[in-house]
């Protein structure tokens, strides 16, 4: 997938993060997917009838920029304290490699959807993922379409400024789950786990997915507005060790952005 902005330049996906997290990505060659109940929007993955699917979805979050020159000052503040780095990749380069990891020494297979655009709505309009049918025996048949295009992609419009795109791992087989419960009872995550044929990763707050070699070859790195000399030394050393290159650029919000990024051995 390739997306072009109005000026003809290719749009990019960017991930604002700390220098420490950047080191972990380079050393492990993996990217973190966080569980949605550990994310910043409490309304995520809730259905219209209050079924909570937060613990069944993992996401890696990126921001859409019209071109590589565009930046988000609020994201520099919120996710790097202005001293981290920004990773940049293109839409068309799918970054992940294997679709298998181990759980209790057994292989688990998963699908990664994305990158998909986040849908921003007000608090009263969360995603409608489930339907109820009242049966003659007094039970409710709960049907949840787990690969609905909106699952894990709806956030409160308060977060609209992040302009987020997301890769998702949905922790359930690609099919419908049918749950029968008493009319007066509402299904909960534990009931979905109990009755559904799940891959049972719900005890993990995060999982780490291996990245392709091309991800490291093509990604670009930008320094945060307030990066100091020590930050530059660390980032360049990490890149030289794990990437064999150390090309960096300054954030456009940096006061010293016109200075060359060099290591001076005489600096105390």
Image: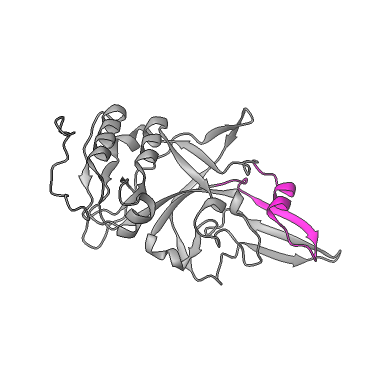
At a point 57% along the width and 37% down the height, the residue shown is: 109
Name the image quarter holding residue 160: bottom left
At a point 59% along the width and 45% down the height, the residue shown is: 171
222 with respect to 129 (left or right): left
109 with respect to 261 (left or right): right
Rendered location of residue 54, percent (x, y): 59, 54
205 with respect to 254 (left or right): right
Rendered location of residue 31, percent (x, y): 43, 39
Residue in front for this viewpoint, 66 or 224 = 224
Name the image quarter holding residue 197: top right
Residue positioned most to the right: 137
Q: Is residue 48 magenta?
A: no
Image: magenta residue range: 170-199
Residue positioned most to the front: 268
Q: Is residue 195 magenta?
A: yes
Rendered location of residue 68, percent (x, y): 25, 52
Where is 103 relative to 176, above or below? above
Q: How is the image coloured?
A: one colour
Rendered location of residue 138, percent (x, y): 85, 65
Q: Which quadrant is home to the C terminus?
A: top left
Name the image quarter holding residue 127: bottom right
At a point 23% along the width and 31% down the height, the residue shown is: 245
At a point 86% along the width and 63% down the height, the residue shown is: 137
């Amino acid at each position: 997938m390739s997306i072009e902005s109005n000026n003809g330049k290719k749009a990019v996906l960017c991930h604002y993060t700390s220098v420490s997290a950047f080191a972990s990505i380079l050393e492990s060659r993996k990217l973190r997917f966080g569980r949605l109940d550990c994310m910043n929007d409490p309304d995520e993955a809730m259905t219209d009838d209050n079924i909570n699917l937060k613990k069944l979805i993992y996401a890696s979050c990126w921001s859409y920029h019209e071109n590589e020159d565009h930046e988000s000052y609020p994201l520099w503040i919120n996710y790097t304290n202005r001293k981290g780095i920004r990773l940049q990749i293109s839409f068309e380069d799918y970054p992940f490699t294997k679709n298998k990891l181990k759980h209790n020494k057994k292989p688990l297979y998963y699908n990664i959807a994305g990158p998909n655009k986040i849908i921003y709505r007000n608090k009263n309009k969360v995603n409608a993922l489930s339907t109820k049918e009242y049966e003659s025996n007094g039970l409710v048949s709960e049907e949840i379409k787990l690969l609905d295009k909106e699952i894990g992609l709806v956030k409160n419009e308060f977060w609209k400024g992040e302009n987020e795109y997301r890769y998702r791992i949905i922790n359930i087989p690609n099919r419908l789950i049918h749950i029968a419960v008493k009319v007066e009872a509402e299904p909960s995550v534990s009931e979905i786990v109990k009755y559904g044929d799940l891959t049972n990763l719900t005890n993990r707050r995060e999982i780490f997915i291996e990245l392709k070699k091309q991800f490291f070859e093509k990604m670009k790195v930008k320094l945060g507005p307030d990066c100091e000399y020590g930050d530059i030394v660390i980032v360049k050393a990490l890149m030289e060790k794990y990437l064999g290159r150390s090309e960096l650029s300054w954030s456009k919000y940096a006061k010293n952005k016109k200075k060359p990024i060099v290591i001076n051995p005489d600096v105390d």
